[in-house]
Image (spheres, rainbow, N blue to C red):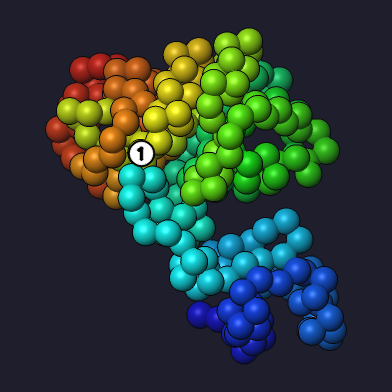
Amino acid sequence: MLNERQNAELLIIDDLGDISLQDLSIRFSDISVMTLRRDLAQLEQDGFILRTRGGAVSLKKLTVEAPSLSGEENEYAMRAHENMAAKKVIAEKALAFVKKGIPMYFDAGSTIMSLARILPDEQYNIITSGVNVAQEVVSHKKTTVMMPGGTVNKNTLSISGPDCISFIEKINIEVAFMSASAFSLDSGFMVSNMYEAQLKNRVIQKAKKSIILMDSTKIGKSFMFTLSGLEDIDILITDGNVPNELYSVAKELGVQIL
Protein backbone atom coordinates (compact mmCIF):
# COMPACT_ATOMS: atom_id res chain seq x y z
CA MET A 1 0.00 0.00 0.00
CA LEU A 2 1.35 3.43 -0.95
CA ASN A 3 1.84 6.09 1.66
CA GLU A 4 0.58 9.67 1.31
CA ARG A 5 3.84 10.95 -0.17
CA GLN A 6 4.06 8.15 -2.75
CA ASN A 7 0.45 8.74 -3.78
CA ALA A 8 1.24 12.42 -4.29
CA GLU A 9 4.26 11.53 -6.41
CA LEU A 10 2.20 9.11 -8.48
CA LEU A 11 -0.48 11.74 -9.14
CA ILE A 12 2.17 14.06 -10.56
CA ILE A 13 3.77 11.36 -12.72
CA ASP A 14 0.39 10.23 -14.08
CA ASP A 15 -0.58 13.83 -14.78
CA LEU A 16 2.65 14.71 -16.61
CA GLY A 17 3.17 11.31 -18.23
CA ASP A 18 6.86 11.31 -17.34
CA ILE A 19 9.21 13.21 -15.06
CA SER A 20 12.92 13.42 -14.30
CA LEU A 21 14.23 12.72 -10.83
CA GLN A 22 15.58 16.26 -10.77
CA ASP A 23 12.15 17.76 -11.44
CA LEU A 24 10.57 15.47 -8.87
CA SER A 25 13.12 16.56 -6.26
CA ILE A 26 12.26 20.20 -6.96
CA ARG A 27 8.58 19.50 -6.39
CA PHE A 28 9.38 17.58 -3.18
CA SER A 29 12.22 19.75 -1.94
CA ASP A 30 11.85 18.51 1.64
CA ILE A 31 12.45 14.89 0.58
CA SER A 32 15.96 13.50 -0.05
CA VAL A 33 16.87 12.19 -3.49
CA MET A 34 17.60 8.78 -1.95
CA THR A 35 14.07 8.63 -0.54
CA LEU A 36 12.61 9.66 -3.89
CA ARG A 37 14.58 6.88 -5.60
CA ARG A 38 13.15 4.37 -3.14
CA ASP A 39 9.67 5.73 -3.77
CA LEU A 40 10.09 5.30 -7.53
CA ALA A 41 11.33 1.75 -7.00
CA GLN A 42 8.22 1.02 -4.91
CA LEU A 43 5.92 2.58 -7.51
CA GLU A 44 7.53 0.46 -10.21
CA GLN A 45 7.30 -2.69 -8.10
CA ASP A 46 3.59 -2.03 -7.57
CA GLY A 47 3.08 -1.65 -11.32
CA PHE A 48 2.31 2.07 -11.54
CA ILE A 49 5.38 3.41 -13.35
CA LEU A 50 8.42 2.34 -15.33
CA ARG A 51 11.72 3.76 -14.14
CA THR A 52 13.95 5.28 -16.78
CA ARG A 53 17.51 6.55 -16.62
CA GLY A 54 17.11 9.68 -14.54
CA GLY A 55 13.37 9.56 -13.98
CA ALA A 56 10.13 7.68 -14.48
CA VAL A 57 7.26 7.30 -16.94
CA SER A 58 3.62 6.63 -16.12
CA LEU A 59 2.36 3.22 -17.20
CA LYS A 60 -1.08 4.76 -17.67
CA LYS A 61 0.40 6.92 -20.41
CA LEU A 62 2.21 4.00 -22.01
CA THR A 63 -0.91 1.85 -21.90
CA VAL A 64 -2.94 4.52 -23.68
CA GLU A 65 -0.27 5.10 -26.32
CA ALA A 66 0.69 1.45 -26.88
CA PRO A 67 -0.40 -0.11 -30.17
CA SER A 68 -2.74 -3.06 -30.17
CA LEU A 69 -1.34 -6.53 -30.68
CA SER A 70 -0.89 -7.40 -34.34
CA GLY A 71 1.78 -10.07 -34.54
CA GLU A 72 4.30 -8.16 -32.38
CA GLU A 73 4.51 -8.57 -28.64
CA ASN A 74 2.73 -5.81 -26.77
CA GLU A 75 4.52 -2.67 -25.63
CA TYR A 76 7.43 -3.60 -23.36
CA ALA A 77 6.33 -1.22 -20.65
CA MET A 78 2.91 -2.85 -20.45
CA ARG A 79 4.50 -6.23 -19.80
CA ALA A 80 7.21 -4.98 -17.46
CA HIS A 81 4.87 -4.76 -14.48
CA GLU A 82 3.03 -8.02 -15.13
CA ASN A 83 3.77 -11.01 -12.86
CA MET A 84 6.42 -8.98 -11.07
CA ALA A 85 6.56 -11.28 -8.06
CA ALA A 86 7.13 -14.29 -10.31
CA LYS A 87 9.85 -12.49 -12.26
CA LYS A 88 11.62 -11.60 -9.03
CA VAL A 89 11.56 -15.25 -7.92
CA ILE A 90 12.93 -16.32 -11.31
CA ALA A 91 15.67 -13.69 -11.24
CA GLU A 92 16.82 -14.73 -7.77
CA LYS A 93 17.06 -18.36 -8.91
CA ALA A 94 19.01 -17.34 -12.03
CA LEU A 95 21.50 -15.26 -10.05
CA ALA A 96 23.14 -18.48 -8.85
CA PHE A 97 24.31 -19.14 -12.43
CA VAL A 98 25.88 -15.71 -12.98
CA LYS A 99 29.66 -16.10 -12.82
CA LYS A 100 32.58 -13.70 -12.82
CA GLY A 101 35.21 -13.71 -15.55
CA ILE A 102 33.26 -15.60 -18.24
CA PRO A 103 31.38 -14.26 -21.30
CA MET A 104 27.65 -14.27 -20.55
CA TYR A 105 24.77 -13.35 -22.82
CA PHE A 106 21.75 -11.52 -21.41
CA ASP A 107 18.72 -11.55 -23.70
CA ALA A 108 16.21 -8.72 -23.85
CA GLY A 109 12.88 -8.89 -22.01
CA SER A 110 11.33 -7.87 -18.73
CA THR A 111 12.27 -11.10 -16.93
CA ILE A 112 15.93 -10.72 -17.90
CA MET A 113 15.67 -7.11 -16.79
CA SER A 114 14.62 -8.37 -13.35
CA LEU A 115 17.88 -10.32 -13.22
CA ALA A 116 19.92 -7.33 -14.38
CA ARG A 117 18.48 -5.22 -11.57
CA ILE A 118 19.72 -7.54 -8.83
CA LEU A 119 23.22 -8.08 -10.23
CA PRO A 120 25.94 -7.02 -7.81
CA ASP A 121 28.76 -4.83 -9.12
CA GLU A 122 31.24 -7.58 -9.93
CA GLN A 123 33.68 -8.37 -12.73
CA TYR A 124 31.09 -9.70 -15.13
CA ASN A 125 31.47 -9.82 -18.90
CA ILE A 126 28.01 -9.28 -20.35
CA ILE A 127 26.89 -9.29 -23.95
CA THR A 128 23.31 -8.17 -24.35
CA SER A 129 20.80 -7.41 -27.08
CA GLY A 130 18.59 -5.64 -24.55
CA VAL A 131 18.85 -1.86 -24.62
CA ASN A 132 17.29 -1.63 -21.17
CA VAL A 133 19.55 -4.37 -19.78
CA ALA A 134 22.66 -2.57 -21.03
CA GLN A 135 21.43 0.68 -19.53
CA GLU A 136 20.87 -1.01 -16.19
CA VAL A 137 24.27 -2.69 -15.83
CA VAL A 138 26.53 -0.16 -17.57
CA SER A 139 26.61 1.93 -14.40
CA HIS A 140 28.41 -0.90 -12.60
CA LYS A 141 32.06 0.04 -12.28
CA LYS A 142 33.44 -3.52 -12.47
CA THR A 143 31.13 -4.91 -15.15
CA THR A 144 31.97 -4.91 -18.87
CA VAL A 145 29.01 -4.54 -21.21
CA MET A 146 28.96 -5.19 -24.97
CA MET A 147 26.09 -4.74 -27.42
CA PRO A 148 25.74 -5.94 -31.01
CA GLY A 149 24.67 -3.62 -33.80
CA GLY A 150 21.27 -3.93 -35.43
CA THR A 151 17.73 -2.64 -35.42
CA VAL A 152 15.97 -1.79 -32.16
CA ASN A 153 12.47 -3.20 -31.73
CA LYS A 154 10.53 -0.53 -29.83
CA ASN A 155 8.09 -3.13 -28.50
CA THR A 156 10.71 -5.37 -26.91
CA LEU A 157 13.70 -3.00 -26.53
CA SER A 158 15.74 -5.69 -28.29
CA ILE A 159 18.39 -5.35 -31.00
CA SER A 160 18.21 -7.89 -33.81
CA GLY A 161 18.90 -8.37 -37.51
CA PRO A 162 21.70 -9.73 -39.75
CA ASP A 163 24.42 -7.51 -38.26
CA CYS A 164 23.47 -8.71 -34.81
CA ILE A 165 23.80 -12.36 -35.78
CA SER A 166 27.11 -11.62 -37.52
CA PHE A 167 28.40 -10.20 -34.24
CA ILE A 168 27.28 -13.30 -32.33
CA GLU A 169 29.23 -15.51 -34.75
CA LYS A 170 32.46 -13.79 -33.69
CA ILE A 171 32.15 -14.23 -29.93
CA ASN A 172 32.20 -17.03 -27.38
CA ILE A 173 29.37 -17.47 -24.88
CA GLU A 174 29.69 -19.60 -21.77
CA VAL A 175 26.23 -19.01 -20.32
CA ALA A 176 23.19 -17.49 -22.05
CA PHE A 177 20.23 -16.17 -20.08
CA MET A 178 17.34 -16.19 -22.54
CA SER A 179 13.69 -15.19 -22.62
CA ALA A 180 10.64 -16.36 -24.55
CA SER A 181 7.10 -15.09 -25.04
CA ALA A 182 5.41 -18.49 -25.11
CA PHE A 183 6.02 -22.23 -24.83
CA SER A 184 4.33 -25.45 -25.79
CA LEU A 185 5.62 -29.00 -26.02
CA ASP A 186 4.63 -29.12 -29.68
CA SER A 187 6.20 -25.84 -30.81
CA GLY A 188 8.89 -25.17 -28.21
CA PHE A 189 9.85 -21.67 -27.09
CA MET A 190 8.33 -18.91 -29.20
CA VAL A 191 8.36 -15.19 -29.95
CA SER A 192 6.44 -13.15 -32.50
CA ASN A 193 9.39 -11.51 -34.29
CA MET A 194 11.25 -13.54 -36.90
CA TYR A 195 14.58 -11.70 -36.53
CA GLU A 196 14.54 -12.03 -32.77
CA ALA A 197 13.78 -15.74 -33.08
CA GLN A 198 16.76 -16.16 -35.40
CA LEU A 199 19.06 -14.28 -33.03
CA LYS A 200 17.92 -16.18 -29.96
CA ASN A 201 18.34 -19.48 -31.79
CA ARG A 202 21.90 -18.66 -32.79
CA VAL A 203 22.82 -17.57 -29.27
CA ILE A 204 21.50 -20.82 -27.84
CA GLN A 205 23.51 -22.78 -30.40
CA LYS A 206 26.69 -20.89 -29.52
CA ALA A 207 26.34 -20.97 -25.74
CA LYS A 208 27.86 -23.80 -23.71
CA LYS A 209 24.94 -23.52 -21.29
CA SER A 210 21.54 -22.06 -22.20
CA ILE A 211 19.09 -21.02 -19.50
CA ILE A 212 15.60 -19.78 -20.30
CA LEU A 213 13.89 -17.52 -17.78
CA MET A 214 10.12 -17.65 -18.26
CA ASP A 215 7.16 -17.27 -15.95
CA SER A 216 4.60 -20.07 -15.97
CA THR A 217 1.80 -17.93 -17.44
CA LYS A 218 3.52 -18.27 -20.83
CA ILE A 219 3.23 -22.07 -20.86
CA GLY A 220 0.53 -23.19 -23.26
CA LYS A 221 0.53 -19.95 -25.25
CA SER A 222 1.55 -19.65 -28.89
CA PHE A 223 3.38 -17.18 -31.13
CA MET A 224 4.41 -17.38 -34.75
CA PHE A 225 8.15 -18.11 -34.58
CA THR A 226 9.94 -20.88 -32.66
CA LEU A 227 13.35 -19.93 -31.29
CA SER A 228 14.27 -23.37 -29.89
CA GLY A 229 12.89 -26.65 -28.69
CA LEU A 230 13.02 -27.80 -25.09
CA GLU A 231 15.80 -30.20 -26.07
CA ASP A 232 18.03 -27.27 -27.13
CA ILE A 233 18.39 -25.77 -23.66
CA ASP A 234 19.96 -26.90 -20.42
CA ILE A 235 17.83 -25.25 -17.75
CA LEU A 236 14.36 -23.74 -17.57
CA ILE A 237 13.89 -21.38 -14.65
CA THR A 238 10.30 -20.57 -13.84
CA ASP A 239 8.09 -19.72 -10.86
CA GLY A 240 6.27 -23.04 -10.46
CA ASN A 241 2.85 -24.11 -11.73
CA VAL A 242 4.54 -26.30 -14.33
CA PRO A 243 2.41 -29.08 -15.85
CA ASN A 244 3.48 -32.59 -14.86
CA GLU A 245 3.81 -33.54 -18.53
CA LEU A 246 6.43 -30.82 -19.01
CA TYR A 247 8.41 -32.10 -16.03
CA SER A 248 8.31 -35.62 -17.47
CA VAL A 249 9.45 -34.59 -20.94
CA ALA A 250 12.18 -32.36 -19.52
CA LYS A 251 13.51 -35.21 -17.41
CA GLU A 252 13.65 -37.48 -20.47
CA LEU A 253 15.59 -34.79 -22.36
CA GLY A 254 17.97 -34.07 -19.50
CA VAL A 255 16.66 -30.53 -19.08
CA GLN A 256 16.59 -29.20 -15.53
CA ILE A 257 13.52 -27.23 -14.37
CA LEU A 258 13.98 -24.92 -11.41
Q: Give coordinates of residue 45: x percent, y percent.
A: 54, 64
Q: Give coordinates of residue 68: x percent, y percent.
A: 37, 59
Q: Is residue 203 above or below residue 21?
A: above
Q: Is residue 150 above or below residue 54?
A: above
**Number of numbered discs on residues:** 1
Q: Nearer the viewer, residue 253 or 21?
A: 21
Please name the amino acid that badge 1 sits on. Answer: Ser
Task: Identify the residue shown where x is 67% and y is 39%.
Answer: 134
Q: Give coordinates of residue 184: x percent, y percent.
A: 22, 34
Q: Is residue 99 visible?
A: no
Task: Identify the residue shown where x is 45% and y is 50%.
Answer: 87
Q: Give coordinates of residue 5: x percent, y percent.
A: 66, 86
Q: Is residue 208 left or right of residue 216?
A: right
Q: Quadrant of the C terminus?
A: top left
Q: Is residue 177 visible?
A: yes
Secondary structure, mark 1, is loop
Which residue is the site of mark 1? 192
